[in-house]
Amino acid sequence: MSLSFDPITSDFFLWTILILVLGIGLAFVFFYGKKGISKNRLWVKTGLFFGFWAFLAISLLRPHVSDLKDSKPWLVYEESLEQAELDFWMDSLGLEKSVGISDFDLHSDPVVLLGKQFSKEELYFLRGKQVSWILPREQGIIRDISWKGYLRKGEVQRVSFSVFSSKSDQKLSLGIPQVDSVALVTGWNEGLLEFRPSGQGRAELPLVLEKDTLAVLRYFIGPAVPKKYQVQMGFPSAESRTLANWLREKGETVSEQIQLSRETFLQSNPQSDSLQVRIIDPAQLKQKSVQDWVKGEMGNLMLIQVSDPLALTQQVNRLFGTDFELESAGSELENGLEALPFSWKEKPGQEVFQENRIAIQRLGNAQIGISLLESTYPLLLEGKKESYEEIWGDVFGAMEPAEPRSKRLDAPVFQGLEAQIQLFDQDSLPEIWSAGEDTVWLKRSAINPFLAEGTWQATSIGWIDSGTDFSVYGYGLEELPAVRTARNISDLERNSNKIEESQSSPLSPWIGLIGMFLFLGAMWLEPKL
């Protein structure tokens, strides 16, 4: 038996009323005591008042009563589980009774669920119960995993995972060369793998633990949308020219502007009206057009070739209201590059890169970045193109301007389970979205007028086409079983909360009303008797 409350008003007004009535009642009792009424009558009056006050509190608090079964938990296990695993958990948890999921018949509440694969139908009988889920100690079992179901060419793919390892120092990696692996410890491991996919269209990638493939990650790579950059310098340099050429090689639209004098500029491919990212040296901050462009949140700004970081930091903070802060540091970096003898102090709302030598802060819809690296082009001269691309790929990936249209879908998507699709379009948002034979009605966001989202259940397994420019992969029962079970249990817990709410019943409001009337009547009769 448990008791909960659902007050008819806020806590402030509730306790104000109760304290006020209590104060008035006690004041009357004190007044009667001063009049010389006998102690027996005074105790009767006090008892009658507290009885009235208690039933008033019951009426205002509206208590609910629910039944809680007091029984020892059962271990409900997956049928294919080995006996040794079952015995281990029975002993570890101190449980006395166990039953297979197919033989479970409302035995007890709570329940300890052991196994990695349970269907919705098997979990149906656990509705309304307290369920604790335990995964068996199995090498390479994946408890949770997620990645982008759709991304643009050149965009960073991020795979977050939770994996069990029965040994230490094992390597978890993706089946592509030159991508960092993660060393696991014994037990559960959580982490993140990042890489930049190549190619376009449907993509499949194995997740490998040592030599064993744990899962196949499937996602769709859309075409890159060229962004418009401008490299604006007071004088040409190898650093700015190399960066501009690298951006062009990536398919970006790049214009260059060199300031010959205060009023004279040499500019190639001018596109100042639609610029998305400006790369400048500190001298260009004196131009009011640059300041107004940033303050109007018309694009993102990156400052390179800095010579006086202290003065520049004060200038940027004063002009744009940022809070960049420097601290002393060494000048040599691990990759051999040279930097100014400062680093950026990490602040909320900022991102730092390359050993805290590059910092980016968001200002509304715009971003400002400052680099303390003296030069990065020597990496290309030394044949370290990957290191060069890692630096600027991460930086400009973080400063990615908003696209006119895009999609967002988190993977994996399971057949029969709900998934969220988000569409962003600055021109016109569709009302429906189709995936194979499924049609999803979209709802526009109340916060973002360019965003629409919908809930979808894949009805088939395998690649599901959505038009000519997108495909989604629907995972079946046998793939990523523990991840699917986790989502089934999450749905079960939501439904269980609704069942528990429906099982709790409020006390009749007549109890409080009748109680108050009875004690008020007794208080009225007491002086006459």
Image (cartoon, rainbow, N blue to C red):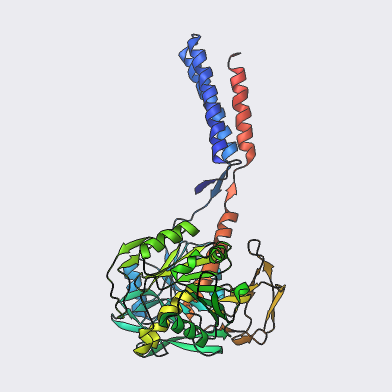
**Horizontal side of residue 329 vs 198, given as left or right:** left
Res 126 visible: no
**Which quadrant is the C terminus positioned in?**
top right
The residue that appears at 59% across and 43% down in the rendered structure is 507
Q: Can residue 121 be seen in this view?
A: yes
Q: Nearer the viewer, residue 409 or 300?
A: 300
Residue at 57 percent across and 28 percent down: it is 52
In the figure, 314 relative to 18: above or below? below
- In the image, residue 34 above or below residue 290: above
Residue 424 rendering spot, x and y as whole percentages: 63, 72
Which residue is at the front of the view, 226 or 527? 226
- Residue 438 is left or right of residue 323, and the answer is right
- At which x and y percent is residue 303? 45, 70
Residue 333 in percent (x, y) is at 30, 76
Which quadrant would residue 165 be assigned to in this image? bottom left
Closer to us: 307 or 475: 307
Given residues 356 and 478, the one toward you in this image is: 356
Residue 476 vertical placement versus 292 (above, below): below
* x and y percentages locating residue 2 in the rendered image: 50, 48
Residue 21, relative to residue 184: is it above or below?
above
